[in-house]
Amino acid sequence: MAKKRSDSLVRTLLLSADPLSDNACRQLLAIRGETRVLDFKESFDPQSNGDWCELIKDLVAMANTDGGYVVVGARNDGSSSGSDLTEAASLDQAVIVDKIGKYTDDQPAEINMRHFREKRKERVIFHVGPTDVPIVFCKPGTYAVSGSKQKTAFGQGTVYFRHGSKSEPARQADIRRAFDSMFSKRRREILSGVKKVVKARADEQVVVLPKSVRLTEDVAAPGVRLTDDPSAPAVRGLVGSGSYSSLQEELAAVVRNLDTDPEAYAAKAQLWRFYTHRKEIGDDGRTMECLLVSSMYRHCPPYYWASQLGAKEVLPICVAEAERDVYPGVQVAIRLAFALGGTAGRAVLQQVARQSRYPSARQLAERLLLKTTVRYRVWGEYGCRQVTIRTQSGSEQYSLSVDDLASAEALIDKALPAKSNRGLVKKLDVLVYGTRLERQAAGSD
């Protein structure tokens, strides 16, 4: 009975306006025992591949089920484990998203974390929202346990769901339930439209439009009003997908969409295609700005577009995103401001550290503020000596150096063909083009 009450309470918190509010965190700390939507972990080491695999398994399983929380720093009964949470608390949400993407090629629709401390209690709390379509692991989550022994947290091609307080491979009932839920949602949307037709008044008409009525990119085309108020603004469809005769035509459509609606970001697939052909795209300022902002909200590499736009033009975007304070844009703005450095870059970080609604954003801004005067700070924050690129024939290792950015840039094109290298491409993007942005800012500061 107590477990059912706990499960019901957690589900109520998941549906609240802020699932990681002070009140929500206090109630989570008071729960004694795991449920289908709540998992406890005694510790979490960001340097441990095993800890990452187990965390990702639970987060994805929860996203596939109903969403939920993973609370680090608690034993199975909910009591404090006493573990050091310093490194876990300094995690950036973007790192979590990238880690999940490494194993799934996809991310949950909503994932957040918070470091919560009150009196003698301290926890790092991960919150994940439900996903419409179950997430599949495209890469096995294996890690060493002792000596040459390996443990598999999840296998390639598997789908995980929550069964009680455990994350386990999908059963037939799980898949049926997931698709029933998806179809029910689509059915409700269709029936809602049908109901409007059925309930139409006698003086109203239902019109079937001829093929000649279509979406168009022509801004002079007549718009459509969804109300009988003649003073209401006309709306037009945004063209964001479909076939294009050239890359430039597709880019032009993306720019027009964002000019019409500032949140009509380019699709992730489009952004990766543009990035692959980035050297074929001119340096038009508005195009670079649209690609940068879209990449900030689609978890795609942003630093090339930023370096093409230039340090002086990137700063106002960082300022605007800091004021807007919407995830994930604000997280990327923090990192871009860190690359910019100087008085202006520090001002952006200080604003986020003071005012952001996201605890993780405030913590990240505070941490990076301490490093903004360091030379080669981008490379120092993200750099590594070696990288491994996956190819059809196996894996290849390459050395990296801040003194040889040209070689590191060449590795981006070598890694791009394989989706499994996308996490690496993001890392190389920040090392190469983030360092270039840092140098641009230093030359104009």
Image: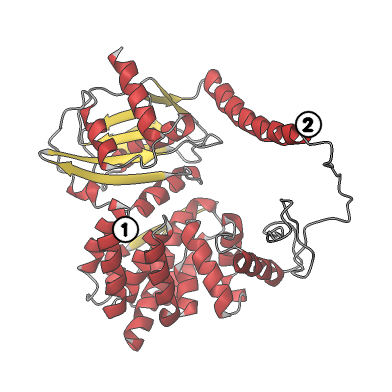
Q: Give residue 356's mark.
A: 1
Q: Is residue 140 left or right of residue 445?
A: right
Residue 287 is drawn in which quadrant?
A: bottom right
Q: Give the spatial CA distance, label 2 vs label 1.
A: 47 Å
Is residue 399 something one can see in this rendering?
no
345 in relation to 390, above or below: below
Tell how many labels.
Answer: 2
**Coloration of the structure image:** secondary structure
Residue 256 place in picture, x, y as percent: 65, 68
Q: Is residue 160 left or right of residue 252?
A: left
Q: Residues within 10 Å of mark 2 (few under 14, many from 20)?
A: few
201 in relation to 94, above or below: above
SS at badge 1: loop
Instruction: Answer with mark 2 or mark 1, whichever residue precedes in sequence.
Output: 2
**Does the residue at mark 2 contact the one at mark 1 (Cβ under 8 Å)?**
no
Amino acid of disc 2: Val
Residue 169 place in picture, x, y as percent: 46, 25
Residue at the location (71% across, 57% down)?
A: 237
Considering every residue shown, the one lying at the far bottom of the view is 444
Q: Is residue 73 left or right of residue 246?
A: left
Residue 21 is drawn in which quadrant?
A: top left
Q: Residues within 10 Å of mark 1 (few under 14, many from 20)?
A: many
Considering every residue shown, the one lying at the far top of the view is 1
Residue 412 place in picture, x, y as percent: 48, 66
Image quadrant in which the N terminus is located: top left
SS at badge 2: helix
Look at mark 2 in the image and give the residue it sits on: 198
Q: Is residue 298 left or right of residue 69?
A: right
> In the depicted view, which residue is nearer to us: 210 or 73?
210
Front of the two marks 2 and 1: 2
